[in-house]
Image (tube, rainbow, N blue to C red):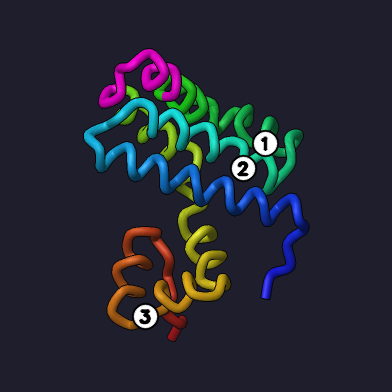
C-alpha cells in the first residue's frame, strides 16, 4: 500500500480528472473547452503530487525541453481554438515528456485498489504491458 499525503491525494484526484476531461474532449470531437480543462487539471494535479520545484525542474530538464515546448505549444493551440492541431502537437510533447515513465506509471496504478485489479487482469495485463513497455518476464 502506498501512503500519500493529503496534498498528493488531491493531486491524484486532479490528475485523474484532467485525464478524464482530456479523454472526454477527444470523444466530443476535440472540444477545446474540455481539452483545456483537462490540461489545467492535469498540470495542477502534477504540481500537487510532486511539488512546484520538482515540477519546474522536470519540465526544464535539457533532455525534456523539446517535449516541454510541444506540450506548451499544444496547450496554447487548444486555448486559441485550434483543438485538433493542438492535440497532435501536445501528444508529441506528452510522449517526449512522459514516454520513459509509462512503465513506472503502470506499476504505480497497479498498486491502487480497483484500478490495480483491472490492470492485473490476465486478459488486459499483456496488452497494457506491451503498450507501456513493461517487461514482466523473469530472466532465465
| Residue at image mark 1 | 55
Residue 14 against residue 4 in the figure, above or below: above
Q: Which residue is located at x 51 percent, y 71 percent?
A: 110
Is mark 1 in CB contact (under 8 Å) with mark 2? yes
Q: Is residue 84 magenta?
A: yes
Q: Which residue is located at x 37 percent, y 22 percent?
A: 78
The earlier-in-sequence mark between 2 and 3 is: 2
Residue 25 against residue 12 in the figure, above or below: above
How far, Cα to Cα, is label 2 from label 3?
27 Å
Q: Position of residue 76 (x, y in %)?
A: 44, 17
* Disc assigned to residue 121: 3
Question: Which quadrant would the C terminus be assigned to in this image?
Answer: bottom left
Judged left or right of residue 45, residue 100 is left
The picture quadrant where one finds residue 82 is top left
Q: Secondary structure at mark 3?
A: loop
* Disc assigned to residue 46: 2
Q: Which residues are magenta?
A: 75-85
Q: Position of residue 95 (x, y in %)?
A: 41, 40
The picture quadrant where one finds residue 92 is top left
Q: Looking at the image, which residue sits at the far bottom?
A: 140
The earlier-in-sequence mark between 1 and 2 is: 2
Q: Is residue 2 magenta?
A: no
Question: Which quadrant would the N terminus be assigned to in this image?
Answer: bottom right
The picture quadrant where one finds residue 32 is top left
Is the residue marked by circle 3 packed among few (<14), some (14-19), or many (20+) residues within 10 Å? few
How far, Cα to Cα, is label 1 from label 2?
7 Å
Q: Main secondary structure of the magenta part?
A: helix
Is mark 2 in CB contact (under 8 Å) with mark 3? no
Residue 119 against residue 33 in the figure, above or below: below
Q: Secondary structure at mark 2?
A: helix
Amino acid at each position: 500500500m502506498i501512503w500519500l499525503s493529503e496534498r498528493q491525494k488531491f493531486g491524484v484526484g486532479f490528475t485523474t480528472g484532467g485525464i478524464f476531461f482530456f479523454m472526454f474532449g477527444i470523444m466530443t470531437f476535440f472540444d477545446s473547452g474540455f481539452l483545456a480543462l483537462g490540461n489545467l487539471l492535469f498540470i495542477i494535479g502534477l504540481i500537487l503530487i510532486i511539488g512546484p520545484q520538482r515540477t519546474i525542474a522536470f519540465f526544464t530538464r535539457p533532455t525534456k525541453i523539446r517535449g516541454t515546448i510541444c506540450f506548451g505549444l499544444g496547450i496554447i493551440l487548444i486555448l486559441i481554438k485550434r483543438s485538433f492541431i493542438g492535440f497532435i502537437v501536445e501528444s508529441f510533447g506528452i510522449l517526449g515528456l512522459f514516454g520513459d515513465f509509462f512503465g513506472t506509471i503502470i506499476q504505480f496504478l497497479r498498486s491502487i485498489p480497483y484500478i490495480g485489479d483491472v490492470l492485473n487482469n490476465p486478459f488486459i495485463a499483456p496488452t497494457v504491458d506491451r503498450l507501456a513497455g513493461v517487461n514482466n518476464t523473469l530472466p532465465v
